[in-house]
Amino acid sequence: MIMAYTMLIPKDDNYIVGKARIEEVNASFKDLGAVCDNIRYKKVEQALELLEKAAKGELPIRYRKHNKKLAHRRELQGQKGRYPRKAAAIVLAVLRNAVANATQQGANEFDLVVKHACANKKRTYYRVQPKGRRGRHDYELARVELVVMQRRPEEKKKEAKPKPTKTAKPTKEEAKPTKAEEKKKVEPEETTKAVEQPKKSKEKAVEEKKAERKEAKAKPAKKEATNGQGDS
């Protein structure tokens, strides 16, 4: 039976995910878990360098659990650890597979981060000593799973050049002026007439005043003439 990953892997397009695992490997799950603890949340470049040294026995691995009666290591600043070379080699192979899966999707190896790393016990087979002896030995298998992730880079949107628009010919309906446009054309003519009318009215008033003055001057002259005829 193949188990699913214990991590909820995001399914959106914001991340590039590379995952790999190995099932029923003949190694101590305690050593594998300690190795996974030392590379979790590290950059892939740093994790690969650490695992390569640990697989050669050049660098100890810190044990947070299952560390009873373990020696304190100077390389770990006095913390407890040991040299699980076999477990480090197994985790290194799984990590390389996960990185290859991520780079196949377009990820950059230097930007990847070990987001998830764990190891658990898988199966246990008991072994009995021969010739009816009472001693028993358990044959334990383990599994390892790793997930590396990288945020997907935002693609630069190409600036689209505006396409030249073709001037469409006006249809018959558009060519005909609407009622509102006809009113706008008529209104200026009416305003010009209204401006000309006051000018004409002013001229008439001036002429009428002049005529009235002439008539007023002519009336006294007529009266004097009539008075002279009466005296004679």
Image (spheres, grey):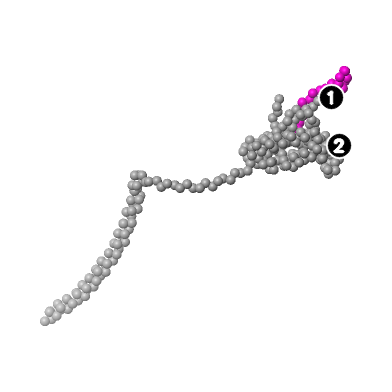
> Which amino acid, mark 1?
His
Residue bearing mark 1:
137
Residue at the farthest bottom position = 232
- Please name the residue shown 88% across and 18% down the image: 131
- Please name the residue shown 86% across and 19% down the image: 130
Verify CB contact (< 8 Å) between mark 1 and mark 2. no
- Please name the residue shown 79% across and 31% down the image: 29
Residue 184: in magenta span: no
Residue at the farthest front position = 56
Residue 7 seen: no
Q: Quadrant of the C terminus?
A: bottom left
Residue 130: in magenta span: yes
Residue 11 seen: yes
**Mark 1 vs 2, N-terminal side:** 2
Residue 83 rendering spot, x and y as whole percentages: 83, 37
Residue 169 rendering spot, x and y as whole percentages: 37, 46
- Please name the residue shown 69% across and 30% down the image: 4
Residue bearing mark 2:
70
Q: Quadrant of residue 218?
A: bottom left
Residue 149 rendering spot, x and y as whole percentages: 68, 39
Front residue of 122/131: it is 131
Relative side of 83 to 94, left or right? right
Front residue of 149/92: it is 92
Residue 54 rendering spot, x and y as whole percentages: 80, 38
Give the magenta-colored segment's residue range. 119-135
**Mark 2 element type:** loop
> Which amino acid, mark 2?
Leu
